[in-house]
């Protein structure tokens, strides 16, 4: 690994995807090219003249003439066609799959009518129900299943769904295809098969590249930065699936420290001394990154947390506390929406008179109110001690309200990170003022970070209370903030 420390990481999610697409094209070449007569690669943007030939190729796959080998060859060629297209062409490919190979609505209506006519005849009704189930099964599901059967087919479909997620809002047909694909992935994805592996500095370089590329919480700036995150007082774990054995699905980074950490810059300081992990009393989960957007909606993060806690508790007997140092990605967006509500004096409702007066004094506006929105848009406000002091009390209180009280339709926490940890049985433990003063931290949460505490004896009860009743468990410090 020594050569890696001399250069900066250049790998990105996009470069990894391009590499994967190339490898898949090569892997499927022999399977697809073994016989003549298959549809040749179209132009990259899939023009109209190539669309009918593509539809014929899809129909050939569905008819499955010539046995299993022929069927695999057709599916491999279909996959290679998709991988040869640019973004515009791939979208057209998926639109054909979504619209031309959807449910046959006339067949469904006919099956429903036949079912209604069966009356009390048990055998006829069972036959009619089977016919209806078959009619409700769109042909595109069979095509997707054929692609899944190819080498690396599961990985291919995960990446394909990631693209569908970006296009589904503009096209209802693609939205329906995405839901079909999600249902297939869920049926194929058994968390019991997940393997937890520790990632260290001695791990293969290709895997370390993926840790860099997939880090979504605190970007890894250099190989030295990565090495620091993999030092002896740090742990990095990932889940792997047998169908994607070389691809981490979700990655968690842990710091072994004394006490609950309150500042990510201190936690990630490369110049800080390395602690003896045997003396640590606290494990801080400071980054949890989903590596593949195509697996969003498939829950396995809670299994990761529990497995990692078990691993750490067995390795380090002195660990008494398991907590996170988490971002609050939606706070500023939520606050901006509240402040910009029409026909309301939002600041008068959100801030007390004393808080507004303190902000005006700190901003130098005298008796004129100082707009909270404008103050937060001032680039260097965290460095202005008087202004930061005036902002601290109202922002801490409003952030506590955002995390603990604001709910989505259905009763889940409005903040997606809060929902993740509360679902897993954590409680909201502490808000940390200016815990992340990076540009991203200021833009997302006004520099605030939050600790979620995983108290082992309370995890199951907290999980049940949140999932069953929407009840958010809070520490006394958070309850004090909520009282204002």
Image (cartoon, rainbow, N blue to C red):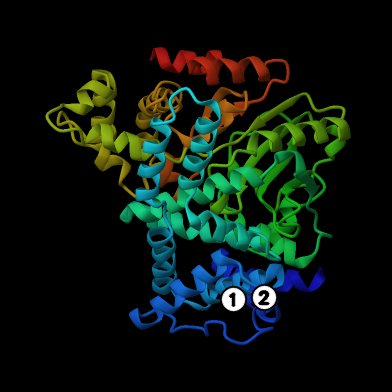
Q: Mark 2 points at which residue?
A: 28
Q: Nearer the viewer, residue 460 or 439?
A: 460
| Residue at the far left in the pictured view | 343
Residue at coordinates 60% horizontally, 38% vertically from top-left? 299
Tell whether 378 sits left or right of 252.
Answer: left
> Mark 1 sits on what residue?
77
Image vertical order of residue 454 relative to residue 307, above or below: above
Label 2: how many Cα within 10 Å (few below 14, some 14–19, many 20+):
many
In the image, residue 257 above or below residue 349 = below
203 or 368: nearer the viewer: 203
Q: In which quarter of the image is the N terminus?
A: bottom right
Horizontally, is 39 left or right of 363 in the view?
right
Q: In which quarter of the image is residue 424?
A: top right
Q: Who is closer to the viewer here, 373 or 93? A: 93
Q: Quadrant of the C terminus?
A: top left
- The relative height of residue 339 versus residue 468 in the rendered view (above or below) is below
Q: Is residue 446 visible?
A: no
Query: Residue drawn at (63%, 41%), measured in percent from left and top?
Result: 286
Give yes or no for contact between labels 1 and 2 (Cβ–Cβ under 8 Å).
yes
Q: What element carries label 1?
A: helix
Residue 357 relative to residue 460: left or right: left
Residue 176 shown left or right of residue 455 in the figure: left
Q: Position of residue 185 (x, y in %)?
A: 59, 48
The mark found on residue 469 in the picture is none
Quote the CA–CA distance across marks 1 and 2. Answer: 7 Å
User: Can you see residue 6?
Assistant: yes
Residue located at (41% from left, 25% from top): 410
Which residue shows up at 23% across the image and 37% down it?
364
Q: Where is residue 187 in the image (x, y as percent from the top left)?
A: 62, 43
Tell me the mark number nearer the camera, choosing from 1 and 2: 1
Quadrant in the rendering for residue 112: top left
Q: Which of 180 and 229 is in front in this view?
A: 180
């Amino acid at each position: 690994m020594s050569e890696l420390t001399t250069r900066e990481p250049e790998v990105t999610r996009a470069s990894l995807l391009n590499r994967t697409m190339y490898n898949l094209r090569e892997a499927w070449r022999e399977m697809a090219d073994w016989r003549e007569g298959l549809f040749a690669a179209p132009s990259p943007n899939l023009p109209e003249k190539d669309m009918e030939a593509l539809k014929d190729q899809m129909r050939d796959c569905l008819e499955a003439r010539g046995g299993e080998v022929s069927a695999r060859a057709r599916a491999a060629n279909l996959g290679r066609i998709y991988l040869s297209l640019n973004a515009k062409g791939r979208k057209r490919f998926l639109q054909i799959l979504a619209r031309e190979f959807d449910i046959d609505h006339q067949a469904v209506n006919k099956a429903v009518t036949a079912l209604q006519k069966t009356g009390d005849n048990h055998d006829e009704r069972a036959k009619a129900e089977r016919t209806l189930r078959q009619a409700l099964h769109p042909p595109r599901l069979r095509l997707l299943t054929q692609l899944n059967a190819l080498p690396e087919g599961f990985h291919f479909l995960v990446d394909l769904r990631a693209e569908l997620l970006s296009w589904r809002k503009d096209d209802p047909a693609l939205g329906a295809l995405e839901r079909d694909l999600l249902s297939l992935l869920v049926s194929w994805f058994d968390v019991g098969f997940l393997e937890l592996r520790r990632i260290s500095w001695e791990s293969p370089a290709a895997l370390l590249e993926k840790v860099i590329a997939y880090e979504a919480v605190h970007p890894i700036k250099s190989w030295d930065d990565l090495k620091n995150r993999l030092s002896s007082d740090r742990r990095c774990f990932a889940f792997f699936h047998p169908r994607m054995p070389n691809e981490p699905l979700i990655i968690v980074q842990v710091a072994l420290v004394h006490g609950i950490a309150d500042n990510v810059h201190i936690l990630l300081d490369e110049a800080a001394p390395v602690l003896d992990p045997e003396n640590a009393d606290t494990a801080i989960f400071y980054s949890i990154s989903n590596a593949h957007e195509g697996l969003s909606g498939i829950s396995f993060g809670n299994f990761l947390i529990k497995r990692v806690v078990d691993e750490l508790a067995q390795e380090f007997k002195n660990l008494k506390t398991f907590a996170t140092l988490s971002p609050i990605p939606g706070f500023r967006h939520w606050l901006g929406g509240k402040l910009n509500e029409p026909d309301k004096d939002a600041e008068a409702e959100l801030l007390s008179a004393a808080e507004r007066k303190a902000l005006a004094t700190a901003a130098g506006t005298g008796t004129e109110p100082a707009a909270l929105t404008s103050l937060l848009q001032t680039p260097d406000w965290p460095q202005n001690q008087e202004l930061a002091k005036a902002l601290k009390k109202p922002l801490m209180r409003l952030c506590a309200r955002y995390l603990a009280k604001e709910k989505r339709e259905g009763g889940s926490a409005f903040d997606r990170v809060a929902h993740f940890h509360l679902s897993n049985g954590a409680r909201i433990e502490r808000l940390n003022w200016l815990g992340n003063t990076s540009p991203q931290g200021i833009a997302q949460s006004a520099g605030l970070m939050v600790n979620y505490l995983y108290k082992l004896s309370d995890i199951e009860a907290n999980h049940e209370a949140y999932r069953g009743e929407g009840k958010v468990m809070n520490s006394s410090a958070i309850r004090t903030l909520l009282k204002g």
